[in-house]
Image (tube, rainbow, N blue to C red):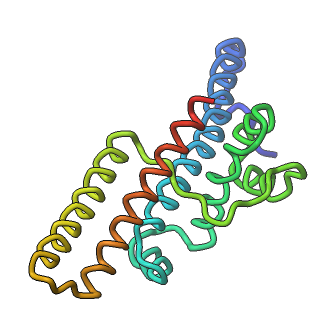
Amino acid sequence: MTEINLYVDPDRLGLAAEKINARARDAEGHARSAVRAALDVGRMLTSAKYYLPHGQWDAWLTENITIKPRTAQAYMRLAKQVPTLPAAEAQRVADLPLREAIKAIATVPDAPARQARERPHLPDAADRERASSTIRKAMASLKAVDKEMSSNVIRPKTVDDVKRKLESALDLINRLSDRREGEAA
């Protein structure tokens, strides 16, 4: 028969109960923090994927990230779906053990329809720096076109470069604007 009193002194059952309750709270807290960590990882992976050139994601993930690609996909789905849930459902999922949380978001009946490509929400400082950088690049391209116009020779490559950089700048500005409107609502 296995000895039961390896961890509990029978004369100190009250103290043992306190320790047991404290460790049980720790275990429950770690389960919740695992879901929070997975949500953070999912958001970071989504952001990293956005910045990689098309077709480079799988190679980058395999070379740089220690978790399996399927786990990465699950974390990204978790990060995408949990914020779209009603508050009570999001809290319920956040309180589940990690594997159950991932299963729960896959089976939520009234989850909103998936959008074609959701852009990550970046911190405000990063948003500002990215917007400034994108606009500076677009302005530099416009100056190149202006210079070519003064010589009466505008190369198609220069025009294409300006179009691409202006579209990128406008896209970023629209996303920031949409995000700010969403936060205000």
In the displayed structure, does residue 20 sit left or right of residue 162?
right
Q: Position of residue 174 (x, y in %)?
A: 49, 51
The part of the image, by quadrant, that contains residue 21 is: top right
Q: How many marks?
A: 0
Q: Residue at x 72, y 19 (%)?
A: 10
> Whole-percent x and y of residue 154?
21, 84
Please determine whether, in this image, residue 181 is positioned above or below residue 168.
above
Answer left or right for 57 relative to 128. right
Q: Residue at x 37, y 73 (%)?
A: 164
**For residue 64, above or below residue 129:** below
Task: Name the residue located 68 percent from the left edge and 30 percent from the top edge.
Answer: 24
Of residues 149 and 1, the one nearer the viewer is 149
Residue 110 in picture, x, y percent from top left: 88, 49
- The relative height of residue 17 versus residue 65 in the rendered view (above or below) is above
| Residue placed most toward the observer, 84 or 9 | 84
Residue nearer the viewer, 170 or 76: 170
Q: Position of residue 71 (x, y in %)?
A: 61, 66
Image point 49% across, 43% down: which residue?
177
Q: Nearer the viewer, residue 119 or 97?
A: 119
- Whether residue 5 sits left or right of residue 135 in the image: it is right
Please state, as top left, top right, bottom left or bottom right, where the C terminus lies in the image.
top right
